[in-house]
Image (spheres, rainbow, N blue to C red):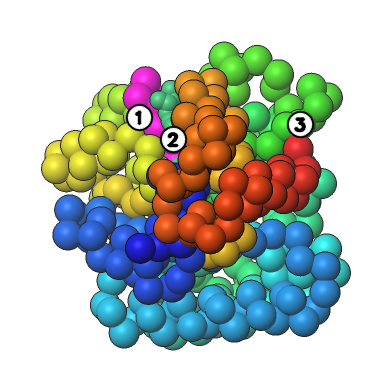
Amino acid sequence: MRPLFPLAGRYIAGTEIEDAVEAARRLNSEGIMAAIDNLGENVRTEAKAAQSVSEYLKLLDAIVKRGVGSSVSLKLTHLGLDVSGDVAYENAEAIVKKALAAGISVRLDMEGAAYTQRTLDVFFKLRSRYENVGVAIQSYLRRSAADVAAIIAAKGSVRLVKGAYKEPPQIAFPDKKDVDANFLKLMQGLLLNGKMPAIATHDESLVNGAITFAEANKIPKDAFEFEMLLGIKRGLQRDLADRGFRVRVYVPYGKNWGPYTLRRLRERKENIWFVLKNLIPLFRGNHTKCGSGAKGRGSDGLGRLFSEASWKIKR
Ligand SMILES: Cc1cc2nc3c(=O)[nH]c(=O)nc-3n(C[C@H](O)[C@H](O)[C@H](O)COP(=O)(O)OP(=O)(O)OC[C@H]3O[C@@H](n4cnc5c(N)ncnc54)[C@H](O)[C@@H]3O)c2cc1C
């Protein structure tokens, strides 16, 4: 069994490349594409960033070898953005170049607002040389309309998301209804003028809004795609694929699952019960339900790992 805890297991394919490729293969068998992401962020040294590059190059080999339909997603702070923009650019370029030769596209995730401009700087530089690179844009940021316009002008591909980090109201809409309204507005612009935009949300009213808008404007189904995260709204993913829409699921894998898992868990208040259900056995000293990874660690092991994951999360 995979060495994963139930807390992460819903959202993460596993810890190894093979786990991610196998998850992609299963999605492909349902007519769904994958976007595999090697979990990790905020590496502080060039040596660690080089390890991340090496993992991504192996991942590309595995995608080709297994013949799965998958792009890759990456975070620039996993490739050394905290060291320097040049280091992150060179590392990303090595991955983008190899992916291009294999016919695979690469998407830059968007991290906290401290990285927005630096991520876009790297994106535009890559985009001026390589066709196969896209970037995520967050509808909660007030600046995003201008960023989307600039990316459309550069014929870049946007993955539109709501945004997963905690940002101050000066730069981000504090109310969910404004985030959703901005998503709708940006989505419509992207559907009309964008290059293969990805509508990345599990919000059914926005998904339905995209379908209605595309139909009304005679935008073909193969001119955009819906993207969702592994473990969320599986039924909707399959339903859209069955109806002939392009659907891609983000498949994260790797040992650094803490920050990603916590972003997913805190996104939804119902998840607190999920967390408690998994933590209660620890207080009872019964950790056998915590998956094979918990074996031999004892309850302190999960507690320690959970708190390690907690301190790693910055926002
Ligand atoms: C493919 C993809 C890539 C992403 N990349 C980025 C990125 O680069 N940068 C970034 O900041 N954010 C990224 N995100 C996350 C995104 O910003 C949101 O935090 C996340 O998608 C939840 O928002 P939502 O659009 O689904 O809408 P919400 O209104 O939050 O959710 C709609 C419904 O989806 C379900 N749902 C949502 N989240 C969860 C959850 N965690 N667990 C269980 N059910 C849930 C619930 O039923 C909820 O009612 C990405 C999301 C996707 C789908």
Check contact, mark 1 vs mark 2: CB within 8 A: yes
Going from N to C along the chain, the mark reached first, 1 or 2, is: 2
Q: Is residue 221 left or right of residue 256?
A: left
Q: Position of residue 305 (x, y in %)?
A: 65, 51
Q: Earlier in the sequence, mark 1 or mark 3?
A: 3
Q: Which residue is mark 1?
A: 207
197 relative to 75, above or below: above
Q: CA distance from mark 3 to mark 2?
A: 19 Å
Q: Secondary structure at mark 2?
A: loop
The residue that mark 3 highlights is 167
Residue 82 coordinates in the image, percent (x, y): 83, 63
Given the image, on which type of amino acid does mark 3 rest? Glu
Q: Amino acid at mark 2?
A: Thr
Position of residue 125 measured from the top left corner of the image (x, y, whole percent): 69, 68
Task: Please name the amino acid that badge 1 sits on.
Answer: Val
In the figure, is residue 10 to the left or right of 272?
left
Instruction: Tell me the magenta residue range.
Output: 197-206
Q: Residue at x 25, y 65 (%)?
A: 25
Report which residue position mark 2 lands on: 201
